[in-house]
Image: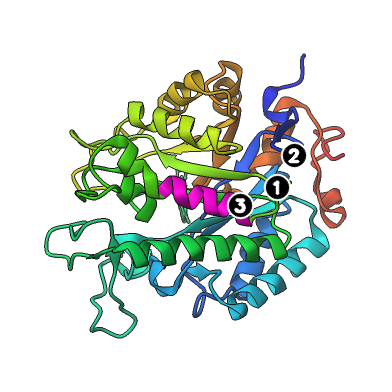
Amino acid sequence: MSRPILFSPIQIGNLKLDNRIVIAPMAQYSAEDGQMNEWHLIHLGQLASSGAALLTIEATAVTPEGRNTPGDVGLYSDDCEAAMARVLRGVRRWSDMPIGIQLNHAGRKASRQKSWEGGAQISPGQPNGWPTYGPSSLAFASGEIPPIALDRDGLAAIRNAFASAARRASRLGLAFIQILGAHGYLLHEFLSPLSNQRSDEYGGSLENRMRFPLEVFEAVRDAFSHDRPVTMRVSATDWVEGGWSIEETIAFVDALQRRGCAAVNVSSGGSSPAQQIPIGPGYQVPLARAVKQATNLPVIAVGLITEFEQAEAILGTGDADLIALARAVLYNPRWPWHAAAHFGVQIKAPNQYLRSQPHRIRNLFV
Ligand SMILES: Cc1cc2nc3c(=O)[nH]c(=O)nc-3n(C[C@H](O)[C@H](O)[C@H](O)COP(=O)(O)O)c2cc1C
């Protein structure tokens, strides 16, 4: 049997990966003042011993107001950086899995309750609430307080905050940055005509709507170690008539590639409560395929990829170059081991766990 593509190596920029399994960013809403703590050591630690090729730290805010919830991780202060350094030191002592970070500004979707508290907007007057910012003063959902439309100084400050977080990520030795340009957060809000109704050079035409996200990409690319990749996560459609579309996504990816983007992670939705998402196994794979056909950047597919053969088929048909897992790997952090056992290939495991190999499986661990 030839080696499954899922377990064949690939490179993203200079970053060499052992296999095609990426752990998607997963917000834990458990930081305090943007600072990671023991929970993040437990969470990232277990995922770093999973055998996946790459681990992505959750959406990390570049300013305090850019946090989606009061529990979001941030990388906007020396204290945030020191807290992340402590967690990374712990994880890296026992795992050599490359760890990257997703940088974000939550825009008009900032100042919300944690998901398990309901996710409602927290108004600026309430404890733990703050004013939100967006391209235009348009609320995400009816009845919500609209964001403050960003002026030039506000845009420059956020661009600088992304660059500053990228410099901190460099110092922390993070292997890559993924910028969050999806899920209805600030950069996606600029892209989507549903949330961006500006009449200046940052709104209107596709070129104008892409301007701020591209400026942020350039600022991050410039600030992060030049030998390490910067990538982007996109929502390839808003799933709303008149919203951001796959055609516009392809134009955006092309513009990113010309600026040195190293890979694109294809997600969808998040811009509007009116979205109609056809949820089912691999529901975002057709979007990844459309992007893949239009670019030669490595493309990462994500979204209800749960089965080993399904993952292999996505790679085998050339719909994507890598697959990312969120819920499936949270549910079963040994998913990559089980996939390796299924395909009869070897995978890395911590020495402490080598004795876990069941008798019926031979030579599972490298
Ligand atoms: C607990 C949890 C937290 C998440 N946090 C983030 C996040 O921080 N950034 C992001 O871009 N997506 C986030 N997502 C979305 C996932 O990265 C992923 O795109 C989505 O869950 C679909 O993949 P899945 O079907 O494998 O879960 C989160 C999903 C879950 C389940």
Q: Which residue is mark 2?
A: 14
Nearer to us: label 1 or label 3: 3
Left or right of 164? Residue 17 is right
Q: The disc labelled 2 sits on which kind of residue?
A: Asn
Residue 317 image position (x, y, % from top left) = 56, 15
**Mark 2–mark 3 distance (CA, rounded to whole Å):** 16 Å
Instruction: Give SS at disc 2.
Output: loop
Residue 147 magenta-highlighted: no
Left or right of 309? Residue 275 is left
Other-residue count near label 1 (Cα within 10 Å), few / some / many at <14 / 14–19 / ≥20: many
Instruction: Give SS at disc 3.
Output: helix
Residue 161 lies, with reference to residue 52, above or below; the image says below
- Between disc 2 and disc 1, whose residue precedes? 2
Quarter the N terminus occupies: top right
**Ligand 1 lies under 8 Å from the Cβ of mark 1:** no
Q: Are marks 1 and 3 in contact (CB under 8 Å)?
A: no
Residue 24 image position (x, y, % from top left) = 55, 47
Q: Which residues are magenta?
A: 213-223
Instruction: Give SS at disc 1.
Output: loop
Q: Which residue is mark 1?
A: 228
**What colouring style does the render use?**
rainbow
Residue 169 lies, with reference to residue 257, above or below; the image says below
Determine the residue positioned at 51% across, 79% down. Answer: 32
Quarter the C terminus occupies: top right
Q: Which residue is mark 3?
A: 222
